[in-house]
Amino acid sequence: MKQKFLLALMMGLFLSISGLRAAEVRVGNDEVKNKSEINEEDKLVVVWTSADKEVAMKMVFMYTYNAKKQAWWDDVTLLVWGPSSKLLSQDKELQDYVKKMIKSGVHVMACKACADEYDVADKLTEIGVTVKHSGQDLTRFIKDRKVVTF
């Protein structure tokens, strides 16, 4: 049942986004637009809060990585919040995936208050995640960008 729900959610998300992006002229994967040329409509923030590895691998990471790699969005940010920060600090496979996302141009940041609560801020920083107090950032993201939460 859980897999059917996740599949239905992914399909709905992909269909929604493809409709939003249909009128856009695509830029090749190797070409990067100047940040000043990126419209607010081309900025996505994925807020990951789940401590469920399957949700991370089969939805959050898969979509976030491909959103950048396939140029569905010009600017992609993954915000690690709450229990996901603890899971990320403990799981090598997830850490390697996050490093791959960072290398592809995804901005990865984590809520410092959450990371401190789980005592994982240093570990997240080691793998390349920007750890900072993010309440104001999240508020700005909600006001200025497309935000998806998991």
Image (tube, rainbow, N blue to C red):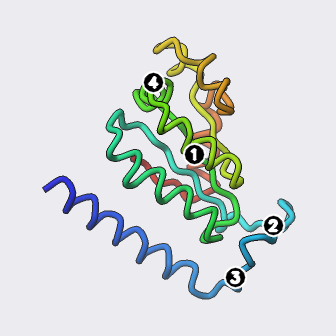
C-alpha gap between disc 4 and disc 3: 37 Å
Tag 4: residue type? Gln
- Which residue is tagged 1? 78
Which corner quadrant holds the N terminus?
Answer: bottom left
C-alpha gap between disc 3 and disc 1: 22 Å
C-alpha gap between disc 2 and disc 1: 19 Å
Sequence order check: which comes first, mark 2 or mark 1?
A: 2
- Which residue is tagged 4? 90
Give me the disc on residue 32: 2
Q: Residues within 10 Å of mark 4 (few under 14, many from 20)?
A: few
C-alpha gap between disc 4 and disc 2: 33 Å
Using the rendered view, name the quadrant where residue 70 is placed.
Answer: bottom right
Q: Residues within 10 Å of mark 1 (few under 14, many from 20)?
A: many
Q: Position of residue 20 (x, y in %)?
A: 53, 78
Tag 1: residue type? Leu
Question: Where is 25 relative to 126, above or below?
Answer: below
Pointers 4 and 3 in contact (CB under 8 A)? no
The one nearer the camera, 129 or 24, is: 129
- SS state under label 1: strand
- SS state under label 4: helix
Tag 3: residue type? Arg
- SS state under label 2: loop
Q: Position of residue 36 (x, y in %)?
A: 86, 62
Give me the disc on residue 26: 3
Residue name at image x 66 percent, y 51 percent: 106
Question: Where is 103 relative to 123, above or below?
Answer: below
